[in-house]
Amino acid sequence: MRWLAGVVLLASPAAAVECADADYLGASYTYCIVTADEDLQLFLRNGAGDILGSFKAVEANTGRDLLFAMNAGMYHEDRDPVGHYVEDGAQEMRVISSDGPGNFGLLPNGIFCISDLLRVYETLDFIAQAPDCTYATQSGPMLVINGALHPRFIENSDSLNIRNGVGTTADGTAAVFAISNDAVNFHNFGTFFRDHLDVPNALFFDGKISRLYAPSLNRSDFGWQLGPIVGVLDATTPAN
């Protein structure tokens, strides 16, 4: 994987998730690499059906430490998912394939699927292939589609925001999650995934509310109460 070459990863030796900072086109980014053999899950509600909403709540609910986490898809005011959402094999929200207002409806959008492999699918391709996802979250727009940027991205757009998303390798054995530490446009965020991280497919999760938990970097972002959260649970260490 070319995006590992020459990079000094900052994760501690005990951590299974590797995170690093990078500069690209004058902006700062942080990204975390997760392989398909890690315990990567999506989290939305506790056993009572209440929205978790924070990284600490995920740890308290699971009784395990998180090695990495970030917000994972758009949500309504009540923090229910806007699009397709599957958790531990149970579907909460169906696939939305129509266009609409906002970034979610800026087609093509896509779905991040967690199973034995990690895949980002364009939504219509997801419908056609009907993969069996243990976890899935839909968001939009797609950032990179089979190596090409989303066709509606504008190189010099002045629509700037903190943004986060996920890309997956061609063989599905790894996902790379990234957040911009500076406000960037969609074009530059997409090219960061395509050209710097070298992933063929990538999906935008959200902007402005974007948050990252990366204990290997001593980073825990606070702020907005979140909807869907994606994270890796420590296989050995219970949460404090």
Image (cartoon, rainbow, N blue to C red):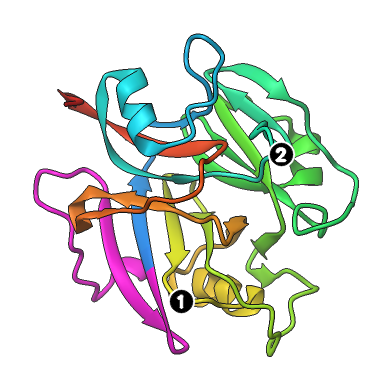
The one nearer the camera, 143 or 51, is: 51
Q: Is residue 140 above or below residue 21?
A: above
Q: Is residue 33 above or below residue 42?
A: below
- Give the residue at mark 1: 182
Residue occupying the point 90% across, 45% down:
98
Count neighbours of disc 1 (C-alpha within 10 A) and say few if under 14, some if 14 to 19, many if 20 or more.
some
Residue 31 shows in the view: yes
Q: Is residue 222 above or below residue 187?
A: above
Q: Secondary structure at mark 2?
A: loop
Residue occupying the point 67% across, 32% down:
78
Q: Is residue 210 above or below residue 90?
A: below
Of the residues shown, which amino acid type is indicated by label 1? Asp
Please give the label number shown on residue 76.
2
The numbered mark, 2 or 1, whose residue comes first in the sequence reads 2
Please give the label number shown on residue 202.
none
* Left or right relative to 219: residue 148: right
Distance between mark 2 and mark 1 Cα atoms? 25 Å
Taking the magenta stretch, the answer to whether it contains residue 11 is yes
Of the 4 image quadrants, the one containing the C terminus is top left
Q: Where in the figure is residue 9, as x and y percent of width and height?
A: 20, 64
Q: How many numbered dots are placed on residues in this image?
A: 2
The one nearer the camera, 76 or 184, is: 76
* Magenta span of residues: 1-29
Of the residues shown, which amino acid type is indicated by label 2? His
Q: Secondary structure at mark 1?
A: loop
Residue occupying the point 57% across, 62% down:
208
Residue occupying the point 20% across, 26% down:
239
Q: Where in the figure is residue 23, as x and y percent of width and height?
A: 37, 81
State yes or no: discs 2 and 1 in contact (Cβ < 8 Å): no
* Left or right relative to 220: residue 113: right
